[in-house]
């Protein structure tokens, strides 16, 4: 096997399993959980698409990097931060100064972008401590219709690498490359000075099963549609005797249909998310500025109740609900009450220093409660602007023994074309 390790992935569809296998390189065998089945050089791994989240690798890591105790949703790749600027600031971005990547963070900010046409391409090798060939690519575009209205579009593509398929007898069944993507179209409009609103439509496609059969039931690619609603407000002010800019943003994303991987099978919530944030920029002089931003996030999906061995609910609320009921009930359905609801909130503080609007240094921190996903990491990065180009880089530093996201890199290139229609301070 040329030094590669071959692992099974089991995909769960209402407790029916499809067996796959894929090659992983340079895996540290010490991280294997005793809960997984070891067969020679093989390790059994769960990739739940039913009662649990999609996972990669032997530790049960969800595809967005959270641990197996995170709240379950379908297509968690939608919650991966795609670009390097916010990726260097603790994954905070809902209230940062607008750029074309607002298509993801807060589409209402598109109304304030500079330039008639903006384009960005981002790429991130993902979960490389677990798998050698998983990656996220993100293409984002925005076009100003006039001084008040902007159209945006973006494509997110998540490549899960090359998988070697085998049957129950470990006979080779060829290879397959599972993938997921989402396609967005956004509209943003200014309403009063400093205030804009945004609306996004999204198509989601998740192809993980290669049309295989499980217990006589054929699996299929999953499709869903969703919407985002967002707002952004900014105000120039004076603080500590200097010019400053305060901004506030809200984005409710992935409000949409449930998703299913088989006809008549179980359906699962999209990762509907509430993101609220504020940012404050201090203009020290004509060349130097500092920005501090802070985001909070909460999934607007049901928290699974605690059940006994017979499936009866001991504590919490039944999570088999409609999408509206799941969203509104997500603030009060945790089995542990208010204290558990607070644990479901993640926090993202970030800092950015810019010199002459050409060179930037950034850092931040992301915190998720250990009982609700356990993503905790420091981020840092830099950016450089030359003519119409912005080049950004970010690095994620986490516990090498604990986090599958440690040493994650992101790269972004932004291009701004056309004259600025927003000459005010960003």
Image: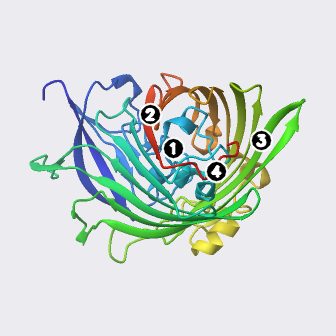
User: In this view of the protein, can residue 358 be seen by the observer?
Assistant: yes
Label 3 belongs to which residue?
A: 245
Mark nearer the N terminus (2 vs 1):
1
Give residue 81's mark.
Answer: 1
**Circles 2 and 4 in contact, beta carbons < 8 Å:** no
Residue 230, image x, y percentages: 65, 61
Between 57 and 323, the one nearer to me in the picture = 323
Q: Secondary structure at mark 2?
A: strand
Question: Is residue 328 placed above or below 405 in the rendered structure?
Answer: below
Looking at the figure, which quarter contains the N terminus?
A: top left
Q: Nearer the viewer, mark 3 or mark 1?
A: 3
How far is disc 1 from disc 4 in space, using C-alphas? 26 Å
Q: Is residue 4 above or below residue 293?
A: above
Q: Using the numbered discs, state the Cα–Cα distance from disc 3 to disc 2 in whole angstroms.
A: 28 Å
Q: How much space separates mark 3 and mark 4, taking CA atoms?
A: 15 Å
The CA span between labels 2 and 1 is 10 Å
Instruction: Give the distance between the C-alpha atoms of the residues marked 2 and 4, in whole angstroms.
Output: 28 Å
Q: Determine which residue is flagged by label 4.
A: 422
3 or 2: tag closer to the N-terminus? 3
Q: Is residue 217 above or below residue 103?
A: below
Rendered-image quadrant of the C terminus: top right
Q: Nearer the viewer, residue 355 or 213?
A: 355
* Residue of label 2: 410
Mark 3 or mark 4: which comes first in sequence? Answer: 3
């Amino acid at each position: 096997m040329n030094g590669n390790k071959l692992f099974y992935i089991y995909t769960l569809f209402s407790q029916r399993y499809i067996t796959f296998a894929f090659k992983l390189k340079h895996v540290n065998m010490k991280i294997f959980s005793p809960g997984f089945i070891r067969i020679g050089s093989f390790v059994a791994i769960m990739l739940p698409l039913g009662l649990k989240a999609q996972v990669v690798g032997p530790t049960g890591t969800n595809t967005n990097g959270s641990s197996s105790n995170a709240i379950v949703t379908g297509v968690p790749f939608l919650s991966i931060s795609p670009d390097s600027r916010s990726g260097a600031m603790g994954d905070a971005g809902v209230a940062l100064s607008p750029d074309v990547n607002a298509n993801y963070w807060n589409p209402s900010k598109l109304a304030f972008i500079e330039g008639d046409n903006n384009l960005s391409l981002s790429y991130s090798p993902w979960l490389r401590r677990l798998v050698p060939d998983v990656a996220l690519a993100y293409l984002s575009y925005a076009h100003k219709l006039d001084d008040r209205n902007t159209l945006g579009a973006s494509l997110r593509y998540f490549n899960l690498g090359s998988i070697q398929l085998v049957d129950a007898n470990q006979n080779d069944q060829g290879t397959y490359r599972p993938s997921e993507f989402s396609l967005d179209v956004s509209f943003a409009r200014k309403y009063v000075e400093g205030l804009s609103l945004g609306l996004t439509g999204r198509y989601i496609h998740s192809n993980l099963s290669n049309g295989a059969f499980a217990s006589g039931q054929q699996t299929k690619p999953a499709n869903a549609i969703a919407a985002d609603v967002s707002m952004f407000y900014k105000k120039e002010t004076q603080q500590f005797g200097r010019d400053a800019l305060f901004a506030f943003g809200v984005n409710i994303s992935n409000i949409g249909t449930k998703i299913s991987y088989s006809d008549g099978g179980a359906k699962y919530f999209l990762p509907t998310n509430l993101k609220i944030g504020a940012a404050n920029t201090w203009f020290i002089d004509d060349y130097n500025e500092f920005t501090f931003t802070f985001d909070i996030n909460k999934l607007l999906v049901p928290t699974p109740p605690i059940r006994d061995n017979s499936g009866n609910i001991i504590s919490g609320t039944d999570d088999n609900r409609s999408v509206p009921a799941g969203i509104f009930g997500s603030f009060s359905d945790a089995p542990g009450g208010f204290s558990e609801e607070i644990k479901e909130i993640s926090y993202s503080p970030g800092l950015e220093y810019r010199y002459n609007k050409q060179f930037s240094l950034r850092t931040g921190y992301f915190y998720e409660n250990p009982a609700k996903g356990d993503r905790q990491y420091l981020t840092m990065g830099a950016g450089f602007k030359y003519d119409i180009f912005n080049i950004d880089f970010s690095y994620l530093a986490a516990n090498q023994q604990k986090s599958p996201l440690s040493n994650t890199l992101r790269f972004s290139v932004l291009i701004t074309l056309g004259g600025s229609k927003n000459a005010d301070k960003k």
